Amino acid sequence: MERKLLRRLRAQFIAVMLLISALFLAFITIFQYESAKRSVEKKAENALRNTIMHYNRGLNAPGPGFINQEDSSGYIGKSGKADSTETADGMSPNGKNERPDFDGSDPVFDSGIDLSMTETICSVYDEDGNFYLMKNDIFYVDDSDIETYSSEASKASLSTGTISGTDLRYMKENTNNRTVIAFTDVSRDMEIVNTQLGTNIRISLVIFFILSILSIFFSIISTKPIEKAWKDQKQFVADASHELKTPLTVISSNVDMLLASSENQSDKTRERLDNIKDESGRMKELVNELLDVARGDMAKTNLVLKDTDLSYVVLETLLMWEPVAFEKGRTINQQIAEDAHVLCDEDKMKQLINILIDNAIKYSDENSTINVELRLGGKHAYLSVSDTGVPLSDEEISHLFDRFYRADASRESTPGYGLGLSIAAQIAAMMNGKLWATCEGNVTTFHFSMHLKKHN
């Protein structure tokens, strides 16, 4: 039982350490990714802002611009192609200015300002909704697609964002009755960010693996004092119980001698001697149970596991208990499947069955029936012992196998020390079986299961 609890403590320690480590590494990885992503977005926004700023500063300014003022064939109109119908002064044949700058001049850059090295696109919608492509540095983005992207960006509620289905970041600004929209491609930068993310994840996995090993190591070290305390406690109980056996044996022997030579003793004296004998007997029984508990782990190494006919063992044990049950006013009803062969220690198995039957007789109602069933199911043998008595709550059921636990106040008057079921659970664990309890109404059932052994 202690070893199982110790393994649980270690598992909980490891789980907590790994959870903290996983959350920390995930936080660092996500933080680095988001920081890198924000840097890419910031870089793109700076390039887009510069593009819009240079367009606005270049309006009506002399000098080289987006297009050659002396050659109107370089101007791209709302059709997305060079407008051959315009005159050299920028006017259409019908006299209407279709360019984004209404004074007949083209927007230009200030040649004294150093532009960003980031490739960008710039487009404009005038107040009449006419579209003009002013600049396209990104050679792999078709001019024919830019109007579609510009339309999507102009309708977006945010002034900056990403065009759906692409890696194009956009920024738009309304100025002088125009909507200026700039684009830049962040695919290469995001590819670098994603590559770095993959590297960080691989590094995190390596760190997590190392922390897993360290957690196991530290869990063993941290629980060593607990393990030593339990060993010292069991050793103390074993030594104390062993030392108590000698004086109890002496007391019992002397009481027997006094009772044998009590012809001249009064009835009161004989009654007191009988009480001493009874109590010393009970004390000796308690000492033996304490020894069984304290030496449980030691007994595991001395188990003699062999092919055992569990059906025969149960029937033989019940045969011994039938007179006791009859004397206590109980009836034992049995349903035992045949040929249930298991790999177990026969003596320990008898002890487990004895504990369950004794517990049922002690705590069942008078004139009630105790049902004992052994059945086969799949690869397991199932033994159940049911008795009718005081109903138990879920809380009481969960503590039935704790040492010195008595489920209710009415059981305090029943002989026993609350060690029997704890010993039974210890025996079940030693033989790789499982022991548990259930309660439906006032019927309490103890279940024991273990693997069947193939028997030829």
Image: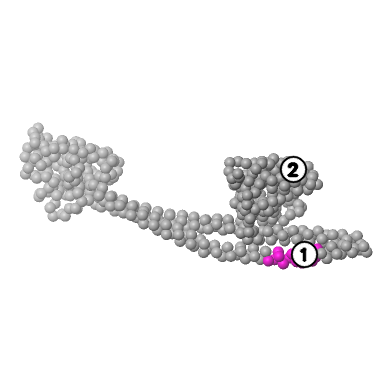
Name the image quarter holding the C terminus.
top right
Q: Residue at x 12, y 47 (%)?
A: 65
Give the amino acid at mark 2: Ile
Vertically, is 286 above or below 156?
below
If the image is split into quadrants, where does the N terminus sit?
A: bottom right
Looking at this view, name the residue that lies furthest to the right: 264
Name the magenta segment's main secondary structure.
Answer: helix
Q: Which mark is residue 175?
A: none
Which label is found at residue 332? 2
> What kind of element bears circle 1?
helix
Between 218 and 454, the residue placed more toward the observer is 454
Front-most of 110 and 386?
A: 386
Q: Which residue is found at the position 93% from the left and 64% from the top?
A: 264
Q: Residue at x 31, y 51 (%)?
A: 194
Observer able to see residue 102: no
Asked whether residue 294 appears in the rendered view, the answer is yes
In this rendering, position of residue 415 left or right of residue 396 = right
Residue occupied by mark 1: 248
